[in-house]
Structure formats: C-alpha cells, structure tokens
Image (spheres, coloured by chain):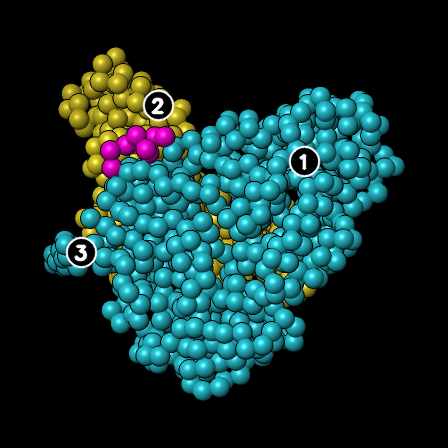
Chain colours: A cyan, B yellow
Amino acid sequence: MRIRAFVVMGALALGLAATPASAKTFRYAFQGDLNALDPYTLNESFTLGALGNVMEGLTKRDKDLKIIPGLAESWEIVDPLKWRFHLRKGVKFHNGEDFTADDVLFSLDRMRSPGSQIKTRAPADMKAVKVDDYTVDFVLTSPNPILNAEWDTWYIFSKKWSEANGATQAQAASATSLNPFALKANGTGPFIVVSHEPGVKTVFKPNPNWWGKKEHNLDEVVFQTIKSDATRVAALLSGDIDMMDPVPVQDIERIKASPNATVLTGPELRTIFLNLDSFRDELLYSNVKGKNPFKDVRVRKAVYQAIDMDAIHNKVMRGMSTNSAILISPLLYARAGEFKRHPYDVAAAKKLLTEAGYPQGFEVELDCPNDRYVNDEAICQAVAQMLSRIDIKVKLNAMPKAKFFEKAGPTKKYDSSFNLLGWTPGSFDSWNILENIIGCRDADGKGGTFNYGGYCNKRIQELNKLILVEADTKKRDEMIYEAFKINHDEVGVIPLHQQALAWGVSKKVKIVQRADNQILFYWATME
Amino acid sequence: MLAFAIRRLFEAALVMVTVALIAFTLFRFVGDPVNQMTGQDTPLEDRLKLRQELGLDDPIAVQFGRFLSGAVRFDFGISYQMKQPVTAIIAERFPATLELALVAALFAVALGIPMGVYTGIHRDSWLAKIFLSVSLVGVSLPTFLIGILLIYVFSVKLGLLPSFGRGDVVQIGFWRTGLLTASGLKALIMPAVTLGLFQMTLVTRLVRSEMLEVLRTDYIKFARARGLPERSINFGHALKNTLVPVITVIGLQLGAIIAFAIITETVFQWPGMGLMFIQAVQNADVPIMAAYLLLVAFLFVLINFLVDIIYVRVDPRIRIYGRAA
C-alpha cells in the first residue's frame, strides 16, 4: 500500500515538473550569488544588474551607457541648485499600484535609511519637493553637475507596498532579525520575479504591462549560480544554459571553437592598478630601514617602467585587456586618449633606481587578491618577476579577497607596502576616482579611503573640490586632465590595464553586452 | 544501555563545544566580512559602524559567549551575505546534501561489497583484476578531476546528463527532494558517483582483504568439508564475519561524505551545505561557517553513536563483553 502511494506521488511529481515545450526560456549563470532582493543593501554590479530587469530608476542608461529617461520622462535644471523631474504617467508597479511622486519621495528616504548601502546616490543635504503627483523638485545646497549620474541604479520602491510588507527601511547589514522583504521584489520593470532561492535559482517572467517598448522575445528567465569555472564552461557547451559570465581567459578559444556557443568580449570599465605606500616614513615590509623608497618619484617611476605591460597583455591576459596610462576607462573620460604610458624600459628604470640611491635594489612585499579580478594573482606574479630585473626583490602575498581587503585596507590601517587593486567609478565619472583612489587620506582612511598607498598631492586636492561643483563640461574636463596629469608625472598610483568582459553566449541568443557588466535580458532575443 | 547513551551524550556536548571554540579562534584569520557586505562607495564611518554593530570589534571571548548562548537556542544569527537566518538556510540546504550523501553511500556499498566478495573469492580471474584496477583509479584520482571528466564525457560529449544543479525538486513538508522527478534523478547520477567512488573503492578493498582473511580460517574449511553449498559458505558465513570492520568504515565514511561533499558540490553546483560553506568561507560569512562546523561535529558524533549500537547488534561478542563490564 505504502509503496503504491509512493509511486503515485512520484508520477504526480513528474507530471508537475514538465514545462510547456514551446516557451522561450533564457537560462543564464554567473559565478556569484544573487542574495537579498533589496537593491539598497548591496551596491554591487551583478545584483544591481539582475534587479535592473525588475526595478527601475528615474533615469536609465542605454546600450552605450548614455543617460536616458526612465521613470522620469524628462528633467531640467531650473537653476544650479534646483533640478525638476517630470515623472512618467500611467506606470504601474507589478502589484498594480500606480507610480507617483510619493514613491520617489519615499524611495529617497529609504535610500537614506540606516541599513542602506547606496546613500551616496544623492548628496546627503539634497531635499525632494513634491510639486504635483508627477513632478518632483530636487533642491541642492551646492551645484552638482553629476547629480543624476547614478540614478539609474537608485531603483524606485512603491510606498504603499513597502509599508504593507514592512520594507520601509533597507535591511541593515547587521540586522539580527530577518526583513521579510529580502526575498521579494516589486518594481515597475520589464520582468517580474516569480521565485527566488538565494544562492541557487531565481525565476523571472515578463511583465505584460510594462510601459516601455519590448525588445526581448523571452517567456521565462532562469538565473542560477555556477561557481566552478570548468562547470560553467561545460554547462554552456552542453547547452544546459544559454549564457554565462565570466568566461575564464584560458577557455575563450575553446568556446569559440565549439559549434553551439561563442564568446562576447568587450572592454570593461574597471581599471587595475598598483599602489605603492608613499604615506609612511618607513615601509612596513621592506629591508630598507629609516626611509621609504616609494616616497621618491624616481623609484616609483622605475617600478612603472620596469613593468612590461605588453607581456602581461599577451601572456597573462591572453589579449583580454587594454593597457592603460590613466586610472579611468577611455569610455568614461573623453580625453583619456591624450595620455601615453611611460615606456617600458628596463635600462631607464635601473638608472632611475641607481640615481635614487638603490643601485642594489631592495626587497618589498606585494599584497594581491587571488579571487577578485581577472588573473589577479598571475598579474602580480608577472610584476614580481619583472621587478627582479631591476633588482627589486618582490615577495608575493596572494590571498582571498576577504583577507586582502582587510589587510591592505582601512580595517588593518593599510598594513601593506605594495598592492594591486581595481576600481570602477560607480558614477561613471572621473571625480569618483580622483577622490577615492588618489585623494589624500590620513592613517585611518579618512579622505580617500581606497587610496591604499596613501599617495597625496595638494594640487589634486584643490582640483577635486573645484571639479565637484563645476558645471561647465569643458572646464571640468580640463581640471580632470590636470589632476590625472599630476598622477601620471608623479607616478602616485601605477595604472596597469582595463580588463575585458567575456560572456559565454549560446549561438541561439542575441544579447547586448554593456561595459558596466550588467546582464540586462530585456535586450535579449532567442531563436 | 541508558548509562552508555548518557555518557555518549555528555561526550558529544564536550566535542561540540571544543569544535566551536577552535572554529572561533580560526575565524579571526578568515578576513574582513564587512568589505563583502558593503558597496565600494560606502563611507569609512559606515563601515566602522557596521563592524561595531556586528560585534566584530569585541574580544573573541565575548563573541564566543554570544555565539554559544545563541547556539543552545538553535539561533545562529543572520547570514552576512544572504540576509536570512542561518538555521533556515541550513534547513533548506541539508536535504540536498543528505540525499546526495546517502545515494553516494548506497552506490559505494551496493557496488563495493559484491566487488569485494568477488575479488576475494576469485582472486586471479581477469574480472577481479579489472575491478581492482578500477578501484585504483578511484583511490588515486582527485574528486574534482573525476567530476570534470564525467561532466565532459556525459554532458558535453554525449549530452546524456545535466552538467550541474539538482534538477526539478518536489516539496514534501519541510523536505525538498530531488528523488521524485526524472530530472532530479538524472542530475543525481554523476555527483553521487563522483562522491561515492572513493568510498566504493575503500569498501571493495576492505571486503576483499577481510574475505581473504576469513576464507583461510578453520570454520570455513570445516563448512566446506561438511559439503555446504558454496553460496552459503561465502555469503552466510564468510561475508557476515567480515562486516564488523566494514560497518565501522562505512559509518565513519558516511560522516565524511556528508561533511566533505564540498568539492563534489562545488564542481556540480549542487545546492547543498558544502557549496554553502565554500561560499561562506570566501565571503567570511562567520555565522554560516560556525553553524556548519557545529553541525558537522554533531553528525560525526551521532554517526559514531549509531555505529556503536549497530556493532552490538552485529557482533554478539561485544554485547557479552559490554554486559560483563
């Protein structure tokens, strides 16, 4: 009897598991997880990208990252201290509620709630004023030319729904009780979350009432995490998934050679660079005592010129990188092309080092993450080996990212003499880099928190203050140029390259690869 | 028997507190969870505040005390990364791991014992030599390589089995099973073989050597002399007497399979506890790591306890000895 019941149950389950055959299901995989569905609790591009299919901001960015209208139809700068946004009419949230100015005001408060990780989306002293149901004024205390630069990922919540679901506050990262909201989402976007198992699987379906023009032809989207590189490649090749990110550099050729999948590559916005501790009077991890060789421009330049970036580009990155003379991607700063790298020249480097008083070289430790950037550890190994040619003996400490950011960052008060870091400016604007990466800081990290080498230049500090409020693009770009030029001449931070994106895509699928690496399937079509 | 059980329970508690303590001292070295929880634009003050709120700046003894007082109430806190209670996450992930482990163990025993018996009896046959060579592969190849090879052959080349995941699952009460759907069963094959191969090899070799030992003893010779059928001698008398060490090994290996399915689960993206643990380590998600290690310690203690009881059932000599003591 019991056995029969078991068999019947099994048969039922099989029946339930079957799905309609004709539906177009787009299955994609990423190496990391999609955890909480609250886009205010983790400011990370993959999560923001996945939720960008479900929720929307006042602005959006198009395929080339240009700012375009989103939930706001248009906006104008009434005066430098007042921006007026006209909201789109007739937009409904997934649960049927209308989108109005109240939701924008509510979302601003929520974005500033204690647990929010996206508080920098708008100045802390900005006020929002509701003019009518479809008009909002944002009032500033100082001019801000890039006010709406990050508003495409400041997703708008429904006020009523949030109140009904106890989601008026962003889940605090340190919360001891669960926000019931963490597994739900209610947006205005082209897709609706059907089910969500963190770290395993998330299912989306199209929103039939979306306000925009539909560019996809999908009936269902399934996201799954596949952590192991080899498995992700195998899953793509066997057709179990239609798209995956990232493709390990060494597997690109193999996938391209396969009959049913290919690799979509393009430049990414992140720049990889080396920090040298020019902050301390004596290096923590070196055999040079009583002075800090990295305080000397000649030593920093010697390190720069001893690194053969073409070799790293060809051998380590297998062509999947763009060498860079500047700390920002050329896609984000129009005048980036005016910078040329100091030439790779071992003899010149050796000469500089001798002039600086280190004819015998010295020893130093290089800290490097091994699970953060593309081939991060291999880049560091190459750098270590190249520096040995000018007798700088590098001891490499490669470690997992959780460990790396603790050691080299503010938590352990920048306990590092030499390290490798990568950075994408969240605002897609140079100021973010000038402030965070080469802005002066103190020993605790006040100021340029991510300036892991502590490089400091007074003129760059002055320029940063001016760039922040300058509304004239040409003047602003000129000042940005000057700041980057100072870093270039003084070799404060050594830029290496922009790594490349590599998505594995089934030949049945057409999808837009945006340089910020957000996977937006509302632009995907399948055969 | 009751005294035995109580003593075991006490020992179990001691083992688990020790494990928790060791784990906690190690957590100091896994790195900073805060950087994985915050975006890159989060200001330094907010980061420091978060560290403080999470209690990461407290002395290790205080953190440990807080953990223990939660643990006795089965409250392991909220995962830093997944923003869900750790107990809920583990309850969700445990069925996947247990199903995988049991099927792997079943595979190991169901194949390992007959192969062991056969190679023990027909020592020089060519089939026995094949079995032994296969078992050599099982011992010597690392798990991840076996997994990748299987995926390459059966998913990429032949397209027979899914390359990753657990297939469709069915919810029965709190238990989410993959054993009741066709895709779930298909998805189970390769991970179970990968995970169980080493244990199968172990069982084969163990049973073989035990059989060789037992077949030489006087009572087997006597049974043969009495003219008992070969089948009854091999399975009724010989195999039964090899089982005590085999049960011990299988029992302990079951614990190992559950606890260390980490590699198999990572290769096949099997949504179980091992995968969860790996992700937790990478993100320095201390609440998950602590709970997982404690659970593994508990499983080992539990399995040991069960093995002890089965022992007594299988081998009467232990029962008599136990009573005398």
Q: Please say whether residue A259 is one of the residues in the magenta stretch.
A: yes
Label 2, label 3: how far apart the Cα atoms are:
43 Å
> How many C-alpha atoms fall within 10 Å of the one at disc 2: few (<14), some, or many (≥20)?
some
A86 with respect to A294 (left or right): left
Main SS type for the magenta part? helix
Q: Which residues are magenta?
A: A253-260
Q: Which residue is mark 3?
A: A23
> Around disc 1, counting alpha carbons within 10 Å, would you say few (fewer than 14), some (14 to 19), or many (20 or more)?
many
Q: Residues within 10 Å of mark 3 (few under 14, many from 20)?
A: few
| In the foreground, B102 or A57 | A57
Residue drawn at x 47%, y 55% as measured from the top left: A45
Q: Secondary structure at mark 2?
A: helix
Q: Nearer the viewer, residue B8 or B61?
A: B61
Residue B55 can be seen, yes or no: no
To the question of a shared chain for discs 1 and 2, the answer is no
Q: Are marks 1 and 2 in contact (CB under 8 Å)?
A: no
Q: Residue B248 sits in which quadrant?
A: top left
Residue A130 in view in this figure:
yes
Residue A366 numbered mark, or none:
1
Question: Which numbered disc, 2 or 3, marks the residue closer to the eye?
Answer: 3
Amino acid carrying mark 1 in the image:
Leu
In three-dimensional space, the C-alpha distance between marks 1 and 3, rounded to whole angstroms, equals 52 Å
Chain at numbered mark 1: A
Screen quadrant of the N terminus of chain A? bottom left
Q: Is residue A424 above or below residue A308?
A: below
* Residue corresponding to mark 2: B137
Q: Position of residue B96 (x, y in %)?
A: 34, 51
